[in-house]
């Protein structure tokens, strides 16, 4: 908390929108902390390259915003990985955030089931994912232990999944907003599509932990007839939730509304302090050396089966980079 003796310089919110950034903020009066994510070229580069069906791209865009939001808050050197596995038309989403600023992502989906979902209009995130689980993994390298948090997917949106994750795993009252859209602009040669994405996270972090209790915990397997355990939420958190619930998708992606103006719009009354925004970029971490090491870790039989037309060819799922090897270089035999 800030020392009241130290004057904090105060200024008007910047009107300049900076894409591909994460900006932390704090509303000290309400014990709230948060982050605003704005993605322009970075999310467009990833989604445009994959050219997935529109609802799959939108869902992956939401996962990218969520991953960047959480990964940039973790004080580690390494990778923060969000991965889903589920039985819906989109079987798997993978988003990698590599500290301090790189992100990459890909999706696995069933083409015909996604096409059917589009025809029937069932293209919400929860409908595309279906049932399964979402894992968040922190990987700090081969010599360090991996941390993994799991949350069930049960037809709910990624926003709701994030709330569940924070409630169960971190026990921090959290609200998340995610938005992804295609911006269309008329340019020479036709309409240009560009993906934009944005998000906001708000967390209630009071000094006294008993103030952080929340009301919406499922009673679980309590005996029948047990009265639900009613907990009155702290006034500050009630106010914080009310404020973030007013944020509209357009405000999160609008290129003319800066992150600073957005948080000022919401929290000017209690007062909001913003911190230096950190930049992000779309960049894969694959390399010829990594692919070679992976091939060498496969069984002899698997490697031999990968030989086609006298060579082994591997395409990176994230960035579509192609790596070719002579079989002998990775210990495979010509077939
Ligand atoms: Zn790659």
Image: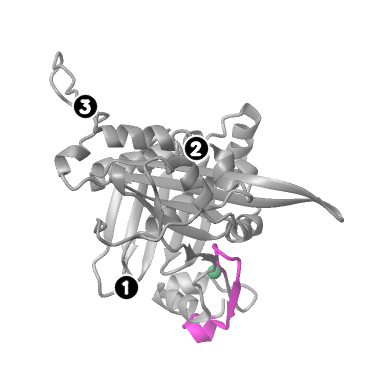
Residue 319 is a magenta residue: yes
Residue 279 position, x and y percent, is 50, 66
Which quadrant would the C terminus be assigned to in this image? bottom right
Which quadrant would the N terminus be assigned to in this image? bottom left
Determine whether label 1 and label 3 are within 8 Å by CB: no
- Check residue 247 in the rendering and tell me which mark sits there, or answer none: 2
Residue 222 is a magenta residue: no
Residue 110 in view (yes/no) = no
Which comes before the other along the chain, label 1 or label 2? Answer: 1
Say which quarter of the image contains residue 211. top left
User: Which is closer to the viewer, label 1 or label 3?
Assistant: 3
Which stretch appears magenta? Answer: 315-333
Q: Secondary structure beneath disc 1?
A: loop
- Check residue 232 in the rendering and tell me which mark sits there, or answer none: 3
- Residue labelled with disc 1: 141
The alpha-carbon separation of the residues under discs 1 and 2 comes to 38 Å
Q: Residues within 10 Å of mark 3 (few under 14, many from 20)?
A: few
Which comes before the other along the chain, label 1 or label 3? Answer: 1
Q: Residues within 10 Å of mark 1 (few under 14, many from 20)?
A: few
Q: Secondary structure beneath disc 3?
A: loop
Left or right: 308 in relation to 85: right
């Amino acid at each position: 908390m800030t020392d009241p003796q130290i004057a904090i310089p105060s200024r008007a919110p910047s009107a300049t929108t900076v894409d591909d950034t994460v900006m932390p903020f704090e509303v000290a009066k309400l014990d709230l902390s948060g982050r605003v994510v704005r993605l322009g070229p970075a999310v467009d580069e990833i989604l445009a390259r994959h050219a997935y069906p529109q609802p799959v791209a939108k869902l992956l865009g939401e996962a990218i915003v969520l991953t960047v939001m959480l990964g940039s808050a973790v004080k580690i050197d390494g990778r923060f990985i969000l991965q889903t596995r589920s039985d819906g038309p989109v079987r798997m989403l993978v988003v990698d955030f590599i500290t301090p600023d790189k992100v990459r992502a890909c999706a696995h989906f069933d083409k015909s089931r996604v096409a059917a979902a589009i025809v029937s209009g069932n293209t919400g995130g929860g409908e595309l994912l279906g049932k399964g689980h979402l894992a968040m993994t922190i990987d700090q390298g081969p010599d360090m232990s991996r941390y993994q948090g799991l949350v069930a997917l049960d037809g709910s949106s990624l926003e709701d999944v994030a709330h569940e994750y924070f409630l169960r795993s971190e026990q921090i009252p959290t609200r998340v907003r995610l938005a992804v859209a295609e911006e269309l602009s008329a340019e020479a040669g036709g309409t240009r599509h560009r993906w934009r994405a944005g998000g906001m996270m708000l967390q209630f972090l009071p000094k006294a932990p008993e103030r952080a209790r929340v009301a919406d915990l499922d009673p679980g397997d309590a005996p029948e007839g047990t009265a639900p355990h009613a907990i009155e939420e702290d006034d500050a958190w009630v106010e914080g939730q009310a404020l973030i619930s007013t944020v509209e998708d357009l405000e999160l992606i609008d290129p003319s509304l800066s992150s600073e103006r957005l948080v000022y719009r919401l929290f000017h009354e209690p007062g909001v302090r913003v911190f230096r925004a950190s930049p992000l970029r779309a960049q894969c971490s694959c390399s010829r050396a990594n692919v070679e090491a992976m091939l060498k870790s496969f069984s002899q039989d698997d490697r031999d089966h990968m030989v086609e037309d006298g060579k082994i060819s591997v395409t990176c799922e994230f960035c579509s980079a192609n790596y070719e090897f002579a079989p002998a270089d990775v210990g495979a035999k010509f077939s």
